[in-house]
Image (cartoon, rainbow, N blue to C red):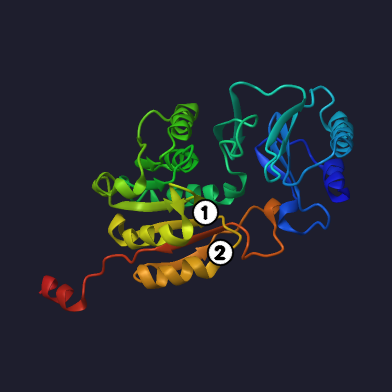
Amino acid sequence: MQFLLNAIATMALPTDAQRLFHGRGGLFAGCEQWALDAFPPVLLLTSFQAVTEEQLATVGVALSTRWAQIAPDQPLNWVFQCRAEGQLETRLMSGTVPDPHVVTENGASFRVHVLKGQNHGLFLDMAEGREWVRRWVSNYAPDQPRLKVLNLFAYTCAFSVVALKAGAKLTVNVDMSHGAMAIGQQNHPLNGISTGATFLMHDIFKTWGKITRSGPYGLVIVDPPSYQKGSFIATKDYAKLMRRLPELLAPGGYALLCLNAPELGLAFLQDQMQALAPELHFIERVANPAAFADVSPERSLKVLAYQMPSLQVPVSDALETNA
């Protein structure tokens, strides 16, 4: 675990929520099980394998030593979570966790919960995806004052917060989880947003009528789980979403397709989009945060941007109009 200890020994005092060490990327031999995240003022250490008390004690000493150097006037708050198969455990190792626990990212605020569950309210690996949305809406909204954004599998609605802060007129957030959406509803006023967001707590595949009636959309964000029994299985359900994109998007609109499934590469998304929604043009793959560097880009988080063509008047029609 020396690479993890080295990262701790050189870490800066985190202010925004972020990943500090990403052993899962396979770039640090012997540390593949470890991840260290900052949800200020709390550090979260995660292991995807069983660990010993001696290992935890070693990490605790390293954290205490570094914390005394970078924040001598602040208590060290850190949580350990074991996510080994069949051994899910979350333990407060030192200090306290705020309640409510609010973190920041690039000027936006979000509620998180590091002491319960495996998902903590904000996916740190999607930071660049949220930044892409912020930049895109900021550039697009001045010319499109009624810009609408559809946020599918909205979870706690971080994309919606970012889009509305950047100038979107309306966001439609759809997710089956009432608990996640309740946090999403809290995240908006936390950022001074009182209007513009709507919330549909339904199965997406049974809500197409309501979703379509609020469109068309200038931006559709699709960020599903890769495998969630009873909700979404990427290998069979992603295609259903792709087929809907042309009818959901306004001319010139964008779709942001996300997939966090190591076993499915870029071709899974690109080949199906070519077959099922060929009118949309591939624009770019959004880079992942540098902290999430991976030995295999094919296995890491995939975020792809596509665009619907703008309406164009045929030359013959234009000549007749001007005659």
Q: Give the labeled residue for mark 1.
A: 226
Q: Give the labeled residue for mark 2.
A: 264
The residue nearer to you, when weighing 44 against 84, is 84
Query: Left or right: 317 with respect to 27?
Result: left
Residue at x-position 31% and y-position 65%? 310
Label 1 near label 2: C-beta < 8 Å? yes
Residue at x-position 62% and y-position 59%? 300
Q: CA distance from mark 2 to mark 1?
A: 9 Å
Task: Give percent across and percent down for residue 49.
Answer: 75, 46
Query: Left or right: 269 with respect to 263?
Result: left
Count neighbours of disc 2 (C-alpha within 10 A) and say few if under 14, some if 14 to 19, many if 20 or more.
Answer: some
Q: Residue furthest bottom?
A: 316
Can I make out residue 186 in this image?
yes
Residue at x-position 39% and y-position 28%? 194
Residue 256, picture quadrant: bottom left
The residue nearer to you, when weighing 83 against 197, is 83
Q: Could you tell me the amino acid type at mark 1?
A: Ser
Can I make out residue 148 in this image?
no
- Disc 2 is placed on an element classified as loop
Task: Give percent across and percent down for residue 323.
Answer: 10, 74
Picture layout, residue 321 above or below residue 133: below
Count neighbours of disc 1 (C-alpha within 10 A) and say few if under 14, some if 14 to 19, many if 20 or more.
Answer: some
Q: Could you tell me the amino acid type at mark 2?
A: Leu
Task: Give percent across and percent down for residue 214.
Answer: 27, 45
